Image (spheres, rainbow, N blue to C red):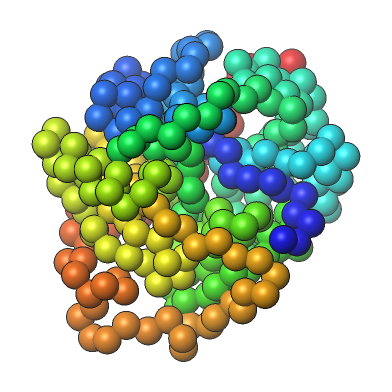
Amino acid sequence: MSDFPVAALRSVEIATPQPGGSADFYTKVWGLDFAAEVGGTIYLAATGSDFHVLELTPSDRTSLRKVSFRVRSREDLHQLFARVREAGCEVVSPPERSLAPSGGESFLVREPQGCGLEFVYGDRTRTARVVANRPERLAHVNINSADIEKLSTFYQEALGFRLSDRSKPMAFLCCNSDHHAVVLADAPVHGLNHVAYLMPDLESVMRGSGRMVDHGYPIGWGVGRHGPGDNVFAYFVDPTGVVVEYTAEVLQIDESYRAKGPGEWVWPPGRTDQWGVAPPKTEACKKAQLSVPFAPQIVTAGRA
């Protein structure tokens, strides 16, 4: 693959008015594990090697505080910091040692449309396991944008991502062999659209979805198979209004993959996925996808 400075999507931080209740949902229903709690923030892990994939921080309202990426080297970390400053990002904290339980060196900025972005090098990892029906790691984060082209250019020119596909409503961006780590969705507001968690296989997506339904969380969209990325999906709304996705079988790509345009990603009338079996997205899911803003302030707790 291309020599990406960003190695992978690592984690997200969600501000929630119900941190305890959210933690119960994600550990008892969604399939994550408790990793640590520091300063009121709860860190939750999947079964893969990331120390955590989700941070839950107390707040008056639900919002996206930051998206965290792991970078390849310390040199890349500092070069990225220079590039994001040149691109007009607001610096929340410069490269420094992190006091979060995951450790490492990191910096935190707010990109021009308002999303908090953290870049980390040298953070702690865990022994990876593959556990049926439980998430392994984050697959992608989907961000709402009123100007996809501007934000896509930022990800490509400042952060070194590559455009993998462009449908009419979305831009798909990769930083490794996964077809996409970041998706930008055309929307009237900036904010979080949804967070996708990678499951081991299609069977795990189906059984995880059944577990959610058993606990009273209806499927918001799916089960189906997306076009760009070729991944299977099932969408849900968590107790505080965050849309979460189980996904699997994400397309693996290299430099030979040709990015397709909006004219090539068209379904027959009435179809919402490749298979043609997924019903239309529920109104509750569509509303939730536009209801989680970026946090108005990002507090740098847990940093030196």
Decide which of 231, 18 is in the foreground and name it. Answer: 231
Decide which of 148, 120 is in the foreground and name it. Answer: 120
Residue 221 appears in which quarter of the rendering? bottom left
Question: Which residue is drawn at the image coordinates 59% and 77% (left, top)?
Answer: 259
Question: Which residue is drawn at the image coordinates 56% and 56% (left, top)?
Answer: 178
Question: Which residue is drawn at the image coordinates 53% and 82% (left, top)?
Answer: 261
Decide which of 64, 183 is in the foreground and name it. Answer: 183
11 lies left or right of 241:
right
46 lies left or right of 233:
right
Residue 276's spot in the image, x, y percent?
A: 22, 75
When the figure is inspected, residue 215 is found, relative to residue 226, above or below; the finding is: above
Is residue 40 shown to the viewer in this render?
yes
Residue 149's spot in the image, x, y percent?
A: 60, 71
Is residue 190 shown to the viewer in this render?
no
Q: Quadrant of the C terminus?
A: top right
Decide which of 41, 134 is in the foreground and name it. Answer: 134
When the figure is inspected, residue 273 is found, relative to residue 213, above or below; the finding is: below
Question: Which residue is drawn at the image coordinates 75% and 61% (left, top)?
Answer: 2
Q: Quadrant of the N terminus?
A: bottom right
Residue 10 appears in which quarter of the rendering? top right
